[in-house]
Amino acid sequence: MDDSLVDLRQELLALLCRDAYRAGEFTLASGQKSHYYINCKPVTLSARGAYLVGRLFLEQLAPEAVAVAGLTLGADPLVVAVSVLSNLAGQDRAALIVRKEAKGHGTMSFIEGPPLPQGAVVTVLEDVIRTGGSALKAVLRLQEAGYVVNEVLAIVDRQGGGAAAFAAQGVPLRSLFQISDLEAYLNHT
């Protein structure tokens, strides 16, 4: 990673700690209790945050990935940011949104976005991973549709078993940050 990407990563870390991380007592989507909560939407739905995430994810994408996808709603701004920035970089990677439930009318599809050929390589994006349940739904839906999911990229890995869940499906997990990165930043500011 060159200096400019290092600077962008550090800026994103500061934004996440300021606008996404909250201390307290929370119940997570998995039903587990936590002493902190990370809601990336205030960051990923801001213009600067979307740019930072899109740029850093785009740098991580494997050359064979023709599209990025994720489960609605958390991944929506991620896939759009990466797709738009890929176009500006001359790469033209499609954005796919994976629904939680099949569309109740029309095509009744789980996946929205431009049509891709069977076997197309797709990278799943996620904001926060703990157990991996949400992103795993996206992985399975994409595989059922005939796509090859090469990996999952997350903004923050809470290190709660998500990597093992994806490994069991043969899909590696990489993240821009581990929870320890946020905690270290917060302890030094």
Image: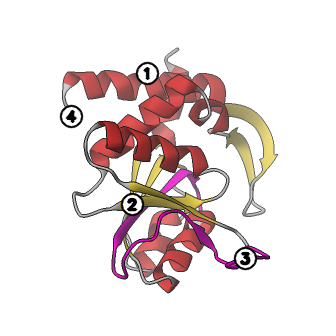
Asked if marks 2 and 3 touch (Cβ < 8 Å), the reply is no
Bin the neighbour count of mark 2 within 10 Å (Cα to Cα): few under 14, some 14-19, many 20 and up.
many
Q: Residue furthest left?
A: 2
Q: Amino acid at mark 2?
A: Ala
Please give the label number shown on residue 11. 1
Image disc number at residue 1? 4
Q: Circle 2 is placed at which residue position?
A: 67
Name the residue at 40% across, 74% down: 167
Among the two numbered marks 2 and 3 on one chain, the one whose residue lies closer to the N terminus: 2
Residue toward you, 52 or 177? 52
**Callout 2 secondary element:** strand
Quarter of the image where the N terminus is located: top left
Measuring 30% from the left and 62% from the top, which residue is drawn there? Answer: 65
- The mark lying in front, picked from 3 and 4, is 3
Give how far across and how far down residue 181 sits, in percent: 45, 35
Q: Is residue 29 left or right of residue 43?
A: right
> How many badges with numbers are in the image?
4
